């Protein structure tokens, strides 16, 4: 089977943004105009192709990243539409890990919002070139240039406006392309095609000064209402100035263009495109376009920009990995004749075909029925079926090539972040890192039948979502599930009940507190059992010390000589890790601690791995109790946008929740408050905010850091925990 298109004509892009900026609406228009769908899906009507889950259609939000493929001008574009809600940030993280480029959708009214910043920094981390699309230009309060300024100020980026709007708000008529020097005029009827005409070089007062072609386009767009002529003339005059600024900005970045610019020559669109592409691929600039996806305006130029400025797989640096055994650094280039290497980035339990593993092919090719090697697990896997996905719909393919994003059936032991490769040329790619859960709820099955199926169902759901964790609490007999937020866990429980028919009682959300220590300490653990015959003997001496917040756990081995045989040291580390799962203050996990193994003793006959594991566990628990342990609570960065008249009430409520206000800003007639608020104080905040502001305020919330619990709160919390344990 031949490759569908040359690898230079492949684009792997993600649509990323803050919630409700219009990502899915943009994706639906891309699919329609590229011919992938015959009808435009609408998020508000629950008909969006990419929002295929029942929960997504009911709530009007994207919950899971959906992949699809379309064609434009002979190019194959693989698209991943990602969620905007912070609770589902894992979907953005794993998608950006395998994508080559991105479209960042921004709201022309709200500008750069909190989750926009989050996804932007995620893209920075993976060095993903991107273009920005300023959406909702037809809305009241839309401001293209304010959004451009926010990209520069809040994202610390270098925006490069390639278009300017022709009109704004209800007079938004189209876009002026500064590179190709054309005007796109969009008709009132959404189903009519836009008219593209050259940017007029001459215009005078009123209609008589415009070229006939341009005047006809405006008439067809019903764009000559009262007062429109002056607005259009203003936009055309601005376009001349902005074009000069664009040429100057690009010339500063590109030596090839600088010569033409200094010679005073008119720079054609082809030269400009090449220079902008080079700067975008180098992550020096971010091209900025604008439109209104809901009104079908600006989508065709956006697709052209994807082809012109975002990278093909061959334009990004070769993927790097290590040899699983030797640790030697290895590179794989995006070519079909290289050894096969791919990264599994998403696992889905499909009700029709079974377990699906999505993966990105970085090099080589693979076909149905072929054997691949999972270098993380050290196991061979067989690819049963290969599928090209279109949201939840599937298309069988026989073979896939470098640069492709596909799904496979039959990879039973492959999980998120695993590397698939050719066994004769093994490679281990960098795994995907995921944030820790911050909120938990307790589940109790309603019936014995539900109990039997619940653990299996939760296991499947945790396979799909690495930020979802589940554990059994033997003290209470409850199953504890943990996730990134209230909405995250609400969706998981809804899926469990709806898709898997497992009914359960759900407890109130609980904060995922942590414990840490504030000073160094030292302790000895002795596990010695003599019962006649073969006994147990393990002596371990440990030191514990606090680490910087967010740096996690580190185990250091300082055993010199033969105080503890080398084969027993991994058992000590296992015992330490097990003990850190339940701290000494209130049985919460211990984080940000360094444990150093400094001394010990063994018996030539009675020593064993279980003995040293127990000794390590005993030593670290004793050391923790002497190291002034404290409780930590998750702190959420909260941003509230409220009308001016409710500002005082909202601010007072934040202060009452132990919030620390970090910024107050004015956005038109709205006030913006950014604050750090303990997660424990945020439950039910959505309802309270609606009540305070007559439902007119909005807010976003995302995890920021862990911080020590104040003594008064810690005392009340410990009293509650101990009272619960006594009962």
Image (tube, helix red, strand yellow):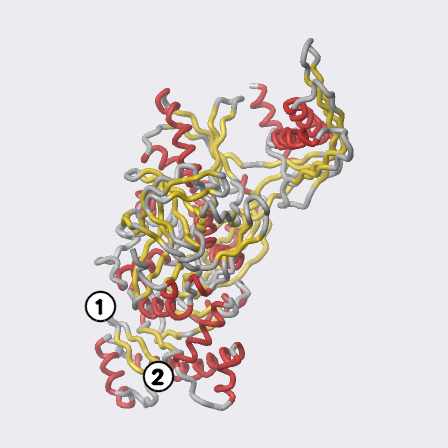
Q: Where is residue 385 in the image (x, y as percent from the top left)?
A: 31, 44
Q: Toward which corner of the image does residue 35 lie, by quadrant?
A: bottom left
How many labels were placed on the picture?
2
Quadrant where the N terminus lies?
bottom left
Q: Which residue lies furthest to the top in this view?
A: 532
The residue carrying pointer 2 sits among few (fewer than 14), some (14 to 19) or many (20 or more) residues within 10 Å by Cα, namely some
Which residue matches tag 1? 189
Residue lying at 54% horizontally and 54% vertically, measured from the top left = 330
Q: Which mark is residue 522?
A: none
Q: Which mark is residue 233?
A: 2
Residue lying at 47% horizontally and 69% vertically, measured from the top left = 280
Q: Which of marks 2 and 1 is in front?
A: 1
Quadrant where the C terminus lies?
top right
The residue carrying pointer 1 sits among few (fewer than 14), some (14 to 19) or many (20 or more) residues within 10 Å by Cα, namely few
Q: Position of residue 156 (x, y in %)?
A: 55, 65
Label 2 and label 1: CA atoms lie apart by: 23 Å
């Amino acid at each position: 089977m031949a490759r569908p298109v040359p690898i230079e004509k492949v684009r792997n892009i993600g649509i990323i943004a803050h919630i409700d900026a219009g990502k899915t609406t943009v994706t639906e228009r891309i699919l329609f105009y590229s011919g992938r769908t015959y009808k435009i899906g609408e998020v508000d009507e629950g008909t969006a192709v990419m929002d295929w889950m029942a929960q997504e259609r009911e709530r009007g939000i994207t919950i899971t990243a959906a992949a699809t493929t379309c064609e434009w001008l002979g190019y194959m574009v693989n698209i991943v539409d990602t969620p905007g809600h912070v609770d589902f940030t894992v979907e953005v993280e794993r998608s950006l890990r395998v994508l080559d480029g991105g479209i960042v959708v921004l709201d022309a009214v709200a500008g750069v919002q909190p989750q926009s910043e989050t996804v932007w920094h995620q893209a920075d981390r993976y060095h993903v070139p991107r273009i920005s699309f300023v959406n909702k230009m037809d809305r009241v309060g839309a401001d293209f240039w304010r959004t451009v300024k926010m990209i520069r100020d809040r994202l610390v980026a270098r925006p490069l406006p390639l278009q300017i709007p022709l009109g704004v708000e209800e007079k938004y008529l189209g876009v002026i392309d500064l590179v190709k020097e054309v005007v796109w005029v969009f008709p009132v009827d959404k189903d009519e095609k836009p008219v593209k005409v050259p940017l007029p070089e001459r215009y005078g007062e009123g209609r008589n000064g415009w070229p006939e072609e341009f005047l006809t386009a405006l008439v067809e767009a019903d764009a000559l209402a009262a007062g429109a002529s002056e607005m259009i003339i203003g936009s055309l005059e601005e376009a001349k100035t902005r074009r000069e600024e664009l040429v100057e900005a690009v010339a500063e970045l590109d030596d090839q263009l600088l010569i033409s610019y200094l010679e005073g020559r008119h720079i054609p669109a082809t030269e400009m495109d090449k220079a902008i592409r080079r700067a975008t691929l180098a992550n020096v600039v971010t091209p900025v376009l604008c439109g209104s996806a809901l009104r079908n305006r600006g989508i065709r130029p956006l697709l052209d920009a994807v082809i012109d400025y975002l990278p093909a797989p061959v334009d990004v640096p070769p993927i790097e990995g290590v040899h699983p055994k030797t640790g030697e650094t290895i590179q794989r280039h995006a070519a079909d004749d290289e050894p096969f290497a791919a990264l599994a980035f998403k696992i889905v339990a499909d009700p029709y075909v079974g377990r699906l593993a999505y993966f990105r092919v970085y090099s080589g090719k693979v076909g149905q029925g072929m054997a691949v090697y999972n270098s993380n697990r050290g196991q061979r896997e067989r690819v049963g079926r290969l599928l090209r996905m279109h949201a939840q719909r599937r298309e069988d393919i026989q073979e896939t090539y470098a640069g492709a994003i596909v799904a496979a059936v039959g990879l039973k032991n492959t999980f998120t972040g695993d590397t698939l490769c050719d066994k004769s040329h093994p490679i281990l790619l960098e795994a995907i890192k995921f944030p820790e859960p911050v909120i938990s709820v307790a589940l109790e099955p309603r019936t014995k039948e539900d109990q039997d199926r619940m653990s299996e169902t939760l296991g499947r759901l945790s396979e799909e979502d690495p930020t979802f964790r589940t554990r059994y609490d033997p003290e209470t007999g409850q199953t504890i599930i943990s996730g990134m937020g209230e909405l995250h866990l609400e969706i998981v429980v809804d899926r469990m009940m709806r898709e898997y028919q497992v009914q359960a009682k759900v407890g109130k959300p609980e904060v995922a507190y942590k414990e840490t220590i504030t000073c160094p300490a030292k302790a000895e653990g002795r596990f010695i059992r003599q019962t006649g015959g073969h006994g147990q003997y393990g002596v371990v001496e440990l030191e514990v010390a606090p680490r910087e917040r967010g740096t996690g756990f580190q185990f250091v081995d300082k055993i010199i000589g033969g105080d503890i045989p080398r084969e027993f040291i991994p058992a000590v580390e296992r015992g330490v890790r097990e003990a850190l799962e339940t701290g000494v203050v209130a049985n919460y996990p211990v984080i940000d601690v360094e444990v150093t193994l400094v001394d010990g003793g063994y018996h030539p006959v009675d020593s064993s791995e279980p003995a040293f594991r127990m000794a390590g566990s005993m030593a670290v628990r004793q050391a923790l109790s002497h190291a002034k342990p404290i409780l930590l609570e998750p702190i959420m960065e909260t941003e509230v946008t409220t009308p001016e008249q409710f500002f005082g009430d909202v601010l007072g409520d934040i202060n009452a929740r132990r919030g620390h206000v970090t910024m107050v800003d004015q956005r038109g007639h709205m006030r913006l408050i950014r604050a750090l608020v303990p997660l424990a104080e945020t439950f039910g905040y959505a309802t309270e905010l609606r009540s305070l502001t007559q439902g007119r305020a909005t807010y976003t919330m995302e995890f920021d850091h862990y911080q020590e619990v104040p003594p008064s709160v810690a005392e009340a919390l410990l009293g509650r925990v101990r009272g619960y344990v006594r009962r």
